[in-house]
Image (spheres, rainbow, N blue to C red):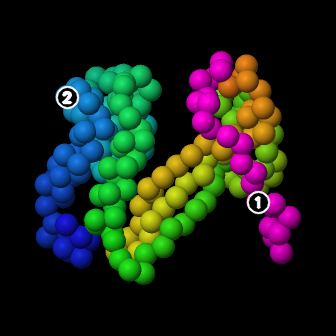
């Protein structure tokens, strides 16, 4: 169903979200994981003032956030398969001949040096060189709306060249260093 069909005010959002759950179910595997993902999605669309683990758990009727935290941190499901399914869903819902891809990066400020890709590098979030990770995101945008359809964590050269560090952090062998465009033009 395209956005033009559900963008009105008479939409049955519960039915639409149930349809989204069916689309992403194959990537989530177990029934328990699918139920937790459904609770998480419902929480994100809820009226909860803040979308913390505790607030989402409360919204879902859970006593603690552990089930939702497990979904995001310990459950076994394929992020790449989920991305592909979401991309197909977005293409179907927002597809338009005038649609464009938007590529942007975001810095995640970090302390320490053990998180994959963390290092002193430029962060647009901070507006300067900071200790951070950098994520590169791709969104699809059309006259019907926009949605994220891909993501990749940037791996700096010092990480890419350090086999021990890569192995310890479980960085896959096929992830390689790619240079970032120069920042000299910023602010001009």
Q: What mark, if any, has residue 5 been given in the picture? A: none
| Residue named by callout 2 | 31
88 in magenta:
no
Query: Which residue of the protein is positioned furthest toward the bottom in this rendering?
Result: 98
- Is 37 on the left-hand or right-hand side of 102? left
Residue 10 x %, y %: 14, 70
The residue shown at (73%, 19%) is 164
Per the rendered image, the range of residues in magenta is 167-188
Report the quarter where the N terminus lies. bottom left
Q: Is 73 or 111 nearer to us in this picture?
A: 73
Find out whether the residues at labels 1 and 2 contact each other: C-beta distance under 8 Å. Answer: no
Determine whether the residue tagged by mark 1 lies in a helix, strand or loop. loop
Q: Residue at x 16, y 66 (%)?
A: 11
> Left or right: 71 with respect to 30?
right
Q: Is residue 14 above or below residue 177?
A: below
Query: Residue 156, position in %: x, y?
Result: 74, 40
Residue identified by numbered label 1: 181
Judge the density around disc 2: few (<14), some (14-19), many (≥20) Cα neighbours within 10 Å: few
Cα gap from disc 1 to disc 2, whole angstroms = 43 Å
Per the image, label 2 sits on a secondary structure element best described as helix
Say if the magenta span includes residue 172.
yes
Work out whether residue 33 can be spotted: yes
- Image coordinates of residue 58 in percent, x first then y, are 30, 33
């Amino acid at each position: 169903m395209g956005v033009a069909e559900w963008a009105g005010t008479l939409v049955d959002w519960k039915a639409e979200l149930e349809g989204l759950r069916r689309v992403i179910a194959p990537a989530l595997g177990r029934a328990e994981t699918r139920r937790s993902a459904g609770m998480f999605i419902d929480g994100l669309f809820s009226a909860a003032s803040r979308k913390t683990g505790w607030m989402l758990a409360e919204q879902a009727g859970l006593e603690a956030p552990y089930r939702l935290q497990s979904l995001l941190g310990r459950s076994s499901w394929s992020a790449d398969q989920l991305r592909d399914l979401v991309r197909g869903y977005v293409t179907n819902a927002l597809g338009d001949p005038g649609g464009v891809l938007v590529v942007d990066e975001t810095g995640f400020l970090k302390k320490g040096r053990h998180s994959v890709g963390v290092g002193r590098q430029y962060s647009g979030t901070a507006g300067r060189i900071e200790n951070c990770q950098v994520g590169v995101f791709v969104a699809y945008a059309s006259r019907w709306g926009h949605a994220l359809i891909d993501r990749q964590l940037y791996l700096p050269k010092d990480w890419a060249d350090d086999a021990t560090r890569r192995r310890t952090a479980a960085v896959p062998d096929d992830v390689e260093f790619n240079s970032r465009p120069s920042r000299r033009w910023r602010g001009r």
